[in-house]
Each structure stands twice: as C-alpha cells, then as structure tokens.
Amino acid sequence: MISVQGQVAVDHNVAISAQKAVQKLGLEMMKGNFKFGQDRMYPRWKRRLAKRVGSMEQLEAQLAAAAQQKINMQLAVTAFNARLPTSFFSVWRAKKIDPRTGKPMRDATGREIIVDHWLAVVPTKTRVKFPDAKIPGKNYLLEEEGYTIAISEKGANDWHFMTGLKPTIQDLRSLFPTLPNTAKELGLPRSVAREIK
C-alpha cells in the first residue's frame, strides 16, 4: 500500500458509519427528497459554492431549482448502493463548537477544544430512470458508478457531504491542502455511467 500524507486508518465502525450515512443520502434521493443532500452539505463546501454563484440565497435557489427540474423530468433514483470507503484522510483542525450555543467549547482548563475532521471517499452505485422526452412510454435506465465525499468531526460520526456539484481534485485540495493531488492517491473510484437495457 502507498503511504499517502494525511491518510489515516480508522476503526471498522467508523467506516461503517460513513457507509451508512451515504446510504441514507441515497435512500433519501430514492424518495425524491433531494433537499436532504442540501441540508447535509458540508458547510465549508456550501459557503464555497455560494461564493461562486454570488450568495447563499442564490445557491439555495439554484439547488431548489435543480431538485424541481429532476421532479419535472420525472427522474427517479431506483437503486442506490454505498460501499465501504476506499480511503480516509485527516483533513481539517477546527474549534469544537457547542451545537446548542454555537460557541467554541472549552476543556477543564479553559482552553478551546480543537478537533480533527476526517474525509471519507465512499464508492457508490446509482440507478436512475427517466422518460424519453420524444417517445411517450419509453424509459431509460442508467447505472452510474461513482463516489461521495463524506466529512465528519473525528469521533462524532456525524457525516456531511460534498454535494450540489461533484468536487474536482482541485476543489478538494483548495479546501484541504494536505490531500494528495491524484485520484489514485486519494482512492477515488473511476466514475462510469452506462445504459441498462
């Protein structure tokens, strides 16, 4: 195995937690609840996307419009399978925030608590059905193999996702400069889509 900077070995239960969180994301898409992915979007990624489009309000409007377009197109996620992560990285250190107050938490000595964040690369397989726009009654079924980037505070198993737009390696490294710069070192599965006949 290649030793890659920032890559970490995690307990099997952490890997299962990441897999289950991504599977929940997929199940919500199968229900047509695309807002779930928006609500669980990694906050730093969401702020980055908002800056690209002009504001958080504009981003929210674009995400809502994209979800509505999927509904209008009668696009349906018919199957979703998340597998165990291919890799984990320690990517970010930040102040631990109290979810009730929104303020940094402190230890017994009064110092702010600093926590690490883990990034998991979770392989996925998704089947999507959509109707032919020109031939009534004809449907297409596509299967896509890809991945979801999941991020959690170390030990919390409260996963957020880099959704809304598939991040490039450059996007990942701009948020987390210690990540490696190749798909192979990151453990990114190759994205492939094919029609199921």
Image (cartoon, rainbow, N blue to C red):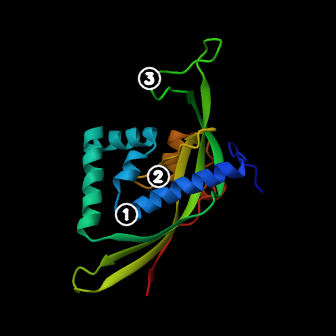
Q: Nearer the viewer, residue 119 or 79?
A: 79
Q: Is residue 108 above or below residue 5?
A: above
Q: Earlier in the sequence, mark 3 or mark 2?
A: 3
Helix, strand or loop at disc 2?
loop
Q: Nearer the viewer, residue 185 or 59?
A: 59
In the rendered structure, find residue 194 and report the number of the disc placed on it.
none
Residue 52 in sight from this viewpoint: yes
The residue under the point 47% across, 29% down is: 99
Residue that badge 1 annotates: 31
In the rendered structure, find residue 167 and report the number of the disc placed on it.
2
Give residue 143's position: percent from left, percent from top. 46, 75
Residue most extreme to the top: 109
Residue most extreme to the right: 1
User: How far apart are the two marked residues, 2 and 1, measured between alpha carbons?
Assistant: 24 Å
Helix, strand or loop at disc 1?
loop
Three-letter amino acid code at the position of disc 2: Pro
Q: Earlier in the sequence, mark 2 or mark 1?
A: 1
Helix, strand or loop at disc 3?
loop
In the rendered structure, find residue 101 and report the number of the disc placed on it.
3
Q: Nearer the viewer, residue 190 or 105?
A: 105
Image-based side of 53 in relation to 96, left or right: left
